[in-house]
Image (cartoon, rainbow, N blue to C red):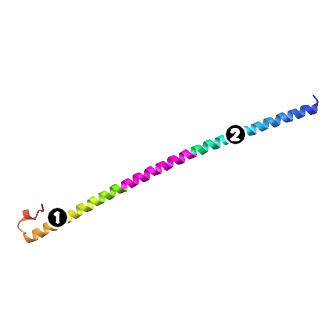
Amino acid sequence: MTNTETLVCVCVYVCVCVCVCIYMYIYRVMELSARYHDESTLKTQRLRSAQLQAEKLLDMRERVNKQRVNALQQQVSITQHNTTQWLTVFRHHPGQLSLAIPH
């Protein structure tokens, strides 16, 4: 084998090694990119799920609060009605408090 042939063989060998290294690097970058994409997708799904749960919880609390407000409004209405009845009876019969208590 001549010097030129040896030099060509060495150059080919170096080129092959460089190509393999580049391929391995690209493969690793693609692998990391895919893993990052998968992790990002999972994180996005978890965040969306948490957001949906928070929205459902908020809706439920709003419904409960509306029910409480309605119940309190009804209590106020009943109390106003009873107070009006009591005042009416008391005005007509001021000496008889027992008659003033609505039944």
Residue 56 is left or right of residue 19, and the answer is left
Look at 61% across and 44% down and name the residue there: 36
User: Which structural element holds mark 2?
Assistant: helix
Q: x, y (%) of residue 41?
A: 56, 46
Quadrant of image for the C terminus: bottom left
Q: Position of residue 58 (x, y in %)?
A: 40, 54
Give, as a three-letter code, the residue at label 2. Tyr
- Mark 2, other Cα within 10 Å: few <14 / some 14–19 / many ≥20: few
User: Is residue 48 in the magenta section?
Assistant: yes
Up the image or down, 57 lies above or below 89; here it is: above
Question: Relative to residue 58, is residue 90 depicted above or below?
Answer: below
- Provide the secondary structure element on which disc 1 rests: helix
The disc placed on residue 27 is 2
Task: Look at 54% across and 48% down and name the residue there.
Answer: 44
Most common SS among magenta residues: helix
Verify whether residue 52 appears in magenta: yes
- Amino acid at the residue labelled 1: Asn
Most extreme residue toward the top, as rendered?
Answer: 1
Residue furthest to the left in view is 95
* CA distance for labels 1 and 2: 82 Å
Q: Which residue is mark 1?
A: 82
Q: Which residue shows up at 41% across the image and 52% down it?
A: 56
Q: What is the span of residues highlighted in magenta in the rendered image?
A: 40-61
- Give the tally of numbered discs: 2
Q: Position of residue 10 (x, y in %)?
A: 86, 33
State which tag comes first along the sequence, 1 or 2. 2
Proximity of marks 1 and 2: CB atoms separated by less than 8 Å: no
In the image, is 17 to the left or to the right of 62? right
Q: In the picture, residue 73 is in which quadrant? A: bottom left
